């Protein structure tokens, strides 16, 4: 299937294939689209390269008349009357049993293939608007040069800086409540901390809505809404019970066709019996698609529930980060670092950060993902430790500065107490050391 997909991509029928996406997504935009295009080609070869319909005409018809009758009946709608029923004389009654889908099967299949591509293109276009370049990250991780230690360290550092800058920007926008777009407020969504994760859930919903919509469109196209809305089950039940096509009316092989011919200025109406050979293929194709769509619906629904749980429930995010930190080459105790993991996930990575790491783990494997999470962990808590050191150093510098502040030439009140000298100065906070005793005093305003 990969070779076939590549061949179709070369003819611009499908997008260039990459296996960075979820397997369920690939079932939609890759496998199902490719399958529908192949089926459309098979039907087209029979429809345009062979004889999709053959009609039994009166003996007086010449070969030209026979060809005309078959071409007319193919282009015009046929109608199906079971062999056990009489053909009604009323023309309008015959039209109630008409079938007209067989000419448009290739175009219907190609349109369905295109509909399975729409969520894929939406994800590719909209995900690039975020500051986190997910596809670029995956491409850098999959670079074969990463087998070299120096290149691998450089890639880790580069991706750490990229993700860190994107997360900082999101936190800054959220903290300051910035809105770069004042009029079109929806354009500010890519700057939020859950843009990519919510977008991915929306794409999952579109995949699910598309495959469910295919059932409705297929029923309308095959004109089965007046017979049996679950025609796939009906056809399968008919086959298991031994009911033949000439009784069920689904994908009939033998149909009737009415046409008029001018003979000597008069209209002559003929009713001929035709064999729709193409329905041999159509029956198998649509039965297979019916049950394939059922399976695809269940798989897509399961995938949506999985990703919704992973994104919306914080416990899964903390478990994911903890598991990879334990696998990383660094000292880590899950029990002692429980609060640190909670801060790392809730305040630093947030929804999009965890989603990108989870997506990277799905596409590239657990080894590089664990190293990248460890690098982000060191970067986050390295900055935190540095901030704490700078804060402590700043406090010490302030204390030393206050110790060296020269007293102002102002009126003072001198007090002696237990060998210590305490000065009350106007509008000052200072530390005074007298007789090796350091006293902290808040000076009161002098009257």
Image (spheres, rainbow, N blue to C red):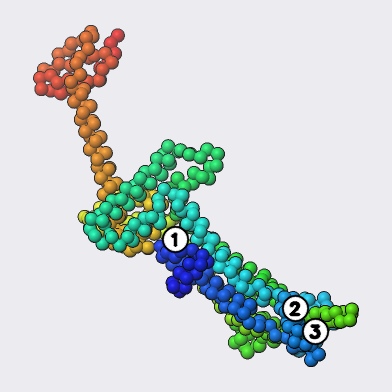
Cα separation, mark 3 vs mark 1, equals 58 Å
Q: Quadrant of the N terminus?
A: bottom left
Which image quarter: residue 140? bottom left
Residue at point 41%, 59% (across, down): 310
Q: Position of residue 181 (x, y in %)?
A: 51, 40
Q: Residue at x 22, y 14 (%)?
A: 424
Q: Is 42 situated left or right of 340 in this image? A: right
Residue receiving disc 2: 72
Q: Earlier in the sequence, mark 3 or mark 1?
A: 3
Q: Secondary structure at mark 2?
A: helix
Q: Which mark is residue 271?
A: 3
| Labels 3 and 1 touching (C-beta < 8 A) | no
Q: Is residue 36 left or right of residue 273?
A: left
From the viewer's side, name the closer residue of 99 and 303.
Answer: 99
| Residue for badge 1 | 307
Relative to 316, say whether 102 is above or below.
below
Instruction: Give coordinates of residue 257: x percent, y percent.
Output: 76, 81
| Residue beneath the point at 67% across and 75% down | 103
Answer left or right for 335 relative to 71: left
Residue 369 in which image quadrant: bottom left
x and y percentages locating residue 76 in the rendered image: 74, 76
The mark lying in front, picked from 2 and 3, is 2
| Numbered marks: total | 3
């Amino acid at each position: 299937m990969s070779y076939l997909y590549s061949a179709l991509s070369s003819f611009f029928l499908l997008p260039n294939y990459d296996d960075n996406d979820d397997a369920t997504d690939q079932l939609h935009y890759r496998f199902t689209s490719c399958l529908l295009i192949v089926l459309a080609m098979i039907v087209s070869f029979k429809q345009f390269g062979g004889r999709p319909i053959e009609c039994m005409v009166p003996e007086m018809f010449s070969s030209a008349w026979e060809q005309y009758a078959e071409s007319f009946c193919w282009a015009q709608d046929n109608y199906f009357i079971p062999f056990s029923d009489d053909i009604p004389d009323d023309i309008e009654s015959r039209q109630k049993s008409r079938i007209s889908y067989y000419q448009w099967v290739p175009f219907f299949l190609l349109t369905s293939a295109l509909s399975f591509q729409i969520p894929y293109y939406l994800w590719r276009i909209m995900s690039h608007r975020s500051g986190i370049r997910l596809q670029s990250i995956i491409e850098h991780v999959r670079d074969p040069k990463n087998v070299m230690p120096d290149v691998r360290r450089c890639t880790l550092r580069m991706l750490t800086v990229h993700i860190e800058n994107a997360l900082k920007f999101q936190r800054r926008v959220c903290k300051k409540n910035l809105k770069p777009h004042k009029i079109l407020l929806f354009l500010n969504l890519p700057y939020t901390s859950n843009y990519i994760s919510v977008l991915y859930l929306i794409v999952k919903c579109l995949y699910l809505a598309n495959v469910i919509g295919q059932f409705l469109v297929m029923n309308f196209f095959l004109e089965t809404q007046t017979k049996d809305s679950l025609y796939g089950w009906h056809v399968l039940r008919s086959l298991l019970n031994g009911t033949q096509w000439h009784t069920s009316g689904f994908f009939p092989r033998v149909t009737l066709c009415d046409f008029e011919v001018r003979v000597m200025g008069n209209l002559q109406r003929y009713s001929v019996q035709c064999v729709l050979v193409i329905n041999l293929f159509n029956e198998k194709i649509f039965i297979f698609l019916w049950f394939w769509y059922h399976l695809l619906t269940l798989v897509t629904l399961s995938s949506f529930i999985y990703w919704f749980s992973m994104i919306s429930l914080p416990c899964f995010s903390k478990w994911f980060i903890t598991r990879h930190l334990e696998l990383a080459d660094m000292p880590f105790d899950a029990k002692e670092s429980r609060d640190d993991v909670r801060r790392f996930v809730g305040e630093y990575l947030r929804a999009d950060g965890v989603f990108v790491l989870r997506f990277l783990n799905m596409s590239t494997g657990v080894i590089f993902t664990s190293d990248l999470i460890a690098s982000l962990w060191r970067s986050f808590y390295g900055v935190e430790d540095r901030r704490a050191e700078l804060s402590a150093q700043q406090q010490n510098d302030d204390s030393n500065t206050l110790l060296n502040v020269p007293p102002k030439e102002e009126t003072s009140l001198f007090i002696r107490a237990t060998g210590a000298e305490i000065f009350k100065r106007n509008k000052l906070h200072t530390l005074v050391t007298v007789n090796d005793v350091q006293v902290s005093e808040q000076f009161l305003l002098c009257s």
